[in-house]
Image (tube, rainbow, N blue to C red):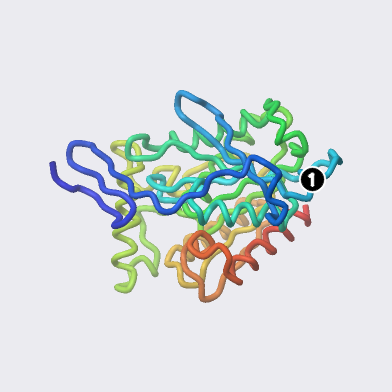
């Protein structure tokens, strides 16, 4: 048994198919209203027990403490990790999404989907779309204030990619009771067989090799980086029906080029409202590794403004 792929500190894949993941610090949900100093509460729910697909719900405490049943926007979040690692239970995600829920006065529904290489694409897309279907008919008490006519899809890195794919399928299927008002991809993970200028730079060699490894582990057998799930230019939908989009890129992230290209692509397709926001001097998914930084608070405020503008 030999090591065939590795992201040090996160995942090892061996020649016999064995996968070993190294889990960073995690957070448990706070299912009671006892912590009055906390700005949010959280709870885990099971979407599909046999797959399995789960989610963590974040509610602002001022909403849960109130007797009011006023409706709140619903932000559905998909974590990153190259489709191979990551979980909404990771401490960084828990803190970031909980604080986002409080800041934006929004219910956050963060999905844990099946991971590659055991479950190659498009399984992640299918799992995350099934979460949207579950939401459309759920009787979960923690979602009774969720306004299903004001749904936002978001995610970082691979999760930003997933948000794009789920939006395309939602347009095609027209899920009853669900209206997607906006997309918020954060440092989205896209690619293609053709390299960008930054990907060809000597300074990006290690990062490109790592991204190529994640694509190799997650793409269907026999498919290359022009697979529709990697190359957004290969996907089609009724672009006139595509929701408003705010794309976030990080100034120090070599995937920044892909984010800019994604924005330009959506504009060419005629998507009515598309904007780009750059976190200057920040690295890829900085908000997960430092969820209480000033840059992360700014990101949360920018997302809040986007939600409130629609």
Locate residue 58: give its quadrant: top right
User: Helix, strand or loop at disc 1?
Assistant: loop
Q: Is residue 213 above or below residue 151?
A: below
Q: Nearer the viewer, residue 243 or 267?
A: 243
* Outermost residue, top side: 50
The single residue placed furthest to the bottom in the displayed view is 281
- Mark 1 is surrounded, within 10 Å at the Cα level, by few (under 14), some (14 to 19) or many (20 or more) other residues, namely few
Residue in view at x 51 percent, y 42 percent: 235
Locate residue 156, reporting x and y percent. Answer: 52, 54
Judged left or right of residue 179, residue 4 is left
| Residue beneath the point at 44% across and 34% down | 123
Which residue occupies the extreme left position in the image? 1
In this rendered view, identify the residue nearer to me: 189 or 171: 189
Give the image location of residue 157, x and y in percent.
48, 54
Depth check, front residue: 44 or 241: 44
Q: Is residue 130 left or right of residue 139?
A: left
Q: Which residue is mark 1?
A: 65
**Where residue 143 sits in the image (x, y, percent)?**
71, 35
Q: Quadrant of residue 180?
A: top right
Please identify the quadrant where the N terminus is shown. top left
Task: Give the residue drawn at x 61%, y 39%.
Answer: 43
Q: Nearer the viewer, residue 26 or 167?
A: 26
Q: Report the number of numbered marks.
A: 1
């Amino acid at each position: 048994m030999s090591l065939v792929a590795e992201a040090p500190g996160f995942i090892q894949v061996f020649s016999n198919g064995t996968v070993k993941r190294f889990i960073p610090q995690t957070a448990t949900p706070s299912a009671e209203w006892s912590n009055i100093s906390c700005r949010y509460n959280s709870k885990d729910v099971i979407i599909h027990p046999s797959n399995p697909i789960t989610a963590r719900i974040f509610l602002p405490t001022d909403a849960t403490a109130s007797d009011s049943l006023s409706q709140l926007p619903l932000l559905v979040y998909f974590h990153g990790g190259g489709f191979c690692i990551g979980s909404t239970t990771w401490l960084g995600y828990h803190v970031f999404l909980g604080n986002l829920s409080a800041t934006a006065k929004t219910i956050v529904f963060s999905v844990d989907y099946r991971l590659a290489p055991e479950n190659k694409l498009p399984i992640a897309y299918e799992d995350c779309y099934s979460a949207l279907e579950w939401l459309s008919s759920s009787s979960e008490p923690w979602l009774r204030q969720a306004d299903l006519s004001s749904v936002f899809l978001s995610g970082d890195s691979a999760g930003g990619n997933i948000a794009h794919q789920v939006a395309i399928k939602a347009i095609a299927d027209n899920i009853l009771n669900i209206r997607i008002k906006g997309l918020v991809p954060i440092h989205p993970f896209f690619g293609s067989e053709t390299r960008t200028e930054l990907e060809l730079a000597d300074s990006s060699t290690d990062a490109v090799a790592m991204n190529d490894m994640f694509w190799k582990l997650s793409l269907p057998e026999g498919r290359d980086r022009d697979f529709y799930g990697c190359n957004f230019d290969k996907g089609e939908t009724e672009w006139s029906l595509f929701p408003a989009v705010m794309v976030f890129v990080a100034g120090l992230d070599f995937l920044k080029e892909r984010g800019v290209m994604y924005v330009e692509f959506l504009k060419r397709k005629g998507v009515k409202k598309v904007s780009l926001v750059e976190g200057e001097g920040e690295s890829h998914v900085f908000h997960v590794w430092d969820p209480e930084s000033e840059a992360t608070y700014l990101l949360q405020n920018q997302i809040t403004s986007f939600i409130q503008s629609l």
